[in-house]
Amino acid sequence: MIDLRSDTLTQPTKRMREAIFQATVGDDVYGEDPTINRLEELAAEMLGKESAVFVTSGTQGNQLAVLAYCSPGDEVIVESESHIFFYEGGAISALAGVQPRAVQGIKGEMNPAAVKSALRSEDIHFPDTSLICLENTHNRSGGSVVSTENMSAIYDIAQNAGIPVHIDGARLFNAAVASNKKVTDFTQYCDSVQICLSKGLGSPVGSLLAGKKEVIQKARKWRKRLGGGMRQAGFLAASGIISLTEMVDRLREDHEKALRLAEAIEEIKGLTLVNRPDTNIVLINIENTNQTNDEFLENLKREGVLAVSFGEGQIRLTTHYDVSFQDIEQAISALKKVI
């Protein structure tokens, strides 16, 4: 079965499995796991931040950032289709007691003027704007890259207003590779950033939140409060080190696979390409097939390919390490058969 549902479905590589087996571990809650400590130091250095903390997931990393920066009753500016607003179960309200203020973007990019306009003025009737959240790459826009120019403009507005900026960078390394930039070209325009190890970077589980030491210390305390204190977590960190040192540059292959898939879809009558992929996510419209999403996905599954529904009449295909170029050709053949 060729699984194009998500890059979260990657299996740990042989090198990761060996590193996990050989890892030296301790109790991370006591700060005594050497492999966790090494991973956090490596991540902070790569992301250009003072400190980092290992967390269970990207969602947890985002939520810890909100909890570290905000107080109940505050307001957080988010893009209207962002993961933190769309896919995290209303957690910023449920956990931090803050309300989101959604600003509509184009391919994940909020207009800086709209962000500035959304900042709350000093008025007892208004909540305090305490955080601005960006997402890069932007999932619901098909893994689109938010430009450093857009990020810089929003960061300047935030700095002038004394408001921190957090990046949901679950696939930030995809953005860096696709743009031929260093990841720090992006992270210079934020106060904190979350990255996932368990998507294109191939680890079985885990993310990292990086930022200033005092922010990460608050996040670490909130992680403990939420039951996220882990013990011999170095087994997971060992895989994460491989992700950061050996799996970043190869993301370019995933982008090439997605582009090949997109170009082929453009030639299949009945399918409409929604996005020209920047990275590893391809969105297709199937309305002209006269099949429902469920019917289309079931027919595709019979041909040996798994995909995922992404709104009415739209399907998402995501390339990753465990999908070969040969698999992409087979997936193209399967799409043709379904049509």
Image: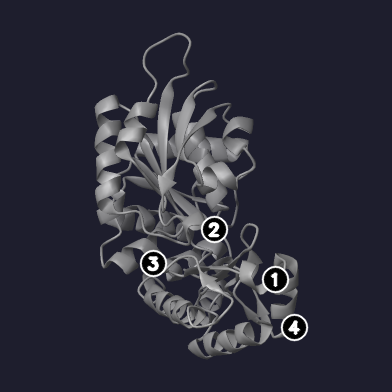
Q: Amino acid at mark 1?
A: Asn
Q: SS of the residue at dot 2? A: loop
Q: Earlier in the sequence, mark 4 or mark 1?
A: 1
Q: What label does residue 302 carry, if any?
A: 4
The residue carrying mark 2 is 206
Disc nearer the start of the sequence (1/2): 2
Q: In front: mark 4 or mark 1?
A: 1
Q: Earlier in the sequence, mark 3 or mark 4?
A: 3
Pointer 1 with pointer 3, Cβ within 8 A: no
Q: Pinpoint residue 269: horizontal percent, then vertical percent.
A: 56, 81
Which of the 4 image quadrants contains residue 2? bottom right
Q: Residue at x 55, y 36 (%)?
A: 222
Tag 3–tag 4 contact (CB < 8 Å): no
Instruction: Report helix, strand or loop for mark 3.
Output: loop
- The reply, left or right, for residue 150 in relation to residue 35 is left
CA separation, marks 4 and 1?
A: 18 Å
The residue drawn where x is 45% and y is 41% is 104
What amino acid is at disc 3?
Asp
The amino acid at mark 2 is: Gly
Q: Distance from label 1 to label 2 (Cα)?
A: 40 Å
State whether residue 89 appears in this view: yes
Q: Label 3 belongs to which residue? A: 278
Residue 110: where, in percent of width, then height?
Answer: 37, 43
User: Mark 1 — residue?
Assistant: 290
User: What's the CA distance linking mark 3 and mark 4?
Assistant: 29 Å
Q: Residue at x 37, y 75 (%)?
A: 252
| Structural distance between the alpha carbons of marks 1 and 3 | 28 Å
- For label 4, the SS is helix
